[in-house]
Image (tube, rainbow, N blue to C red):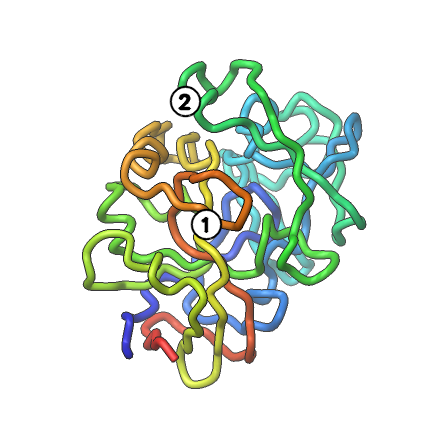
């Protein structure tokens, strides 16, 4: 059964920074080639830096990371390259790059409803979670190595895809949050790539934040809280969700325009 076609491909070489648009990319068990290959660590806490705690790290979304011949290049809002010292100055905390996730690495996630109610700068409750429960060792994914999102969901929310940081935007014709029905199924994209759709993607405060030229938008989370609350995993409460997480069963190459088929 044809579900749609790949409309956009997105890669984020540094966790919690803006990423880059792709026309085609190789995909392996660790996700898109070059995706989330680096992260920053907060020297004070030892935790991975994440805009999920916006009071400390909303500024990460002013920086853009792209793959280059030398590995990864990070630029600031003015387009100039930025190093660790420049990032530490801009973020107001001492940070350092890491290329492999330490065992047991954690990050802080602010309670989204409190951020909505009290604002980005407020000191709100946070939870601490381990990275990459369904991802290969050493990677910097929140949960799994691929994140898919449909144009149907984006239309239902009225928000730009960049706010939700997907790897694959799938053009679909069904109305509403159509990818919810893919959970637990296998999907083939193009001639070879085969995925297992694991869980709905729970949303934090990140979609509401300023993303480069995109202004703050509380609606990016409020609409989901009103219209698409799901239980991502057994034992979790209902949470606002958009998109789905997936793992790679058979590697392949993704291209814009590839057909997306339910196996």
x and y, in percent, of residue 171 in the image: 27, 63
Residue 159 position in % (x across, y down): 29, 41
Locate residue 215: give its quadrant: top left
Q: Is residue 185 above or below residue 209?
A: below
Query: Tag on residue 201?
Result: 1
Q: Is residue 168 left or right of residue 154?
A: right
Q: Residue at x 36, y 41 (%)?
A: 229
What residue lies at 55% left-to-right and 29% top-to-bottom? 59
Return the x and y of residue 138 as percentages of the image width and height.
Answer: 74, 57
Tag 1 secondary structure: strand
Q: Nearer the viewer, residue 161 or 85?
A: 161
Chain-order first, disc 1 or disc 2: 2
Spatial CA span between label 1 and label 2? 19 Å
Give the numbered dot on residue 116: 2
Quarter-wise, where is residue 157 in the image?
top left
The secondary structure type at the circle numbered 2 is: helix
Q: Against 88, is 250 above or below?
A: below
């Amino acid at each position: 059964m044809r579900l749609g076609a790949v409309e956009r491909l997105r890669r984020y070489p540094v966790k919690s920074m803006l990423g880059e648009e792709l026309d085609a990319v190789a995909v392996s068990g660790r996700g898109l080639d070059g995706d989330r290959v680096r992260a920053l660590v907060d020297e004070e806490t030892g935790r991975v830096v994440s805009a999920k705690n916006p009071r400390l790290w909303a500024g990460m979304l002013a920086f853009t990371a792209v793959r280059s011949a030398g590995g990864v290049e990070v630029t600031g809002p003015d387009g100039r390259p930025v190093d660790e010292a420049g990032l530490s100055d801009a973020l107001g905390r001492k940070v350092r790059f890491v290329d492999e996730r330490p065992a047991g690495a954690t990050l802080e996630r602010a309670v989204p409803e409190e951020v909505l109610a009290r604002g980005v700068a407020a000191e709100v409750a946070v939870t601490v979670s381990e990275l990459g429960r369904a991802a290969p060792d050493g990677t910097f994914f929140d949960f799994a190595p691929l994140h898919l999102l449909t144009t149907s969901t984006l239309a239902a929310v009225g928000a730009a895809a960049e706010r939700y940081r997907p790897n694959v935007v799938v053009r679909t014709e069904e109305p509403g949050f159509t990818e919810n029905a893919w959970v637990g199924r296998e999907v083939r994209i193009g001639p070879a790539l085969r995925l297992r759709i694991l869980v709905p993607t729970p949303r934090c405060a990140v979609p509401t934040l300023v993303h480069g030229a995109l202004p703050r938008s509380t609606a990016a989370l409020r609409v989901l809280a009103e219209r698409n609350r799901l239980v991502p995993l057994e034992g979790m409460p209902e949470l606002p969700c958009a998109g789905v997480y997936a793992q790679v069963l058979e590697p392949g190459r993704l291209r814009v325009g590839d057909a997306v088929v339910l196996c």
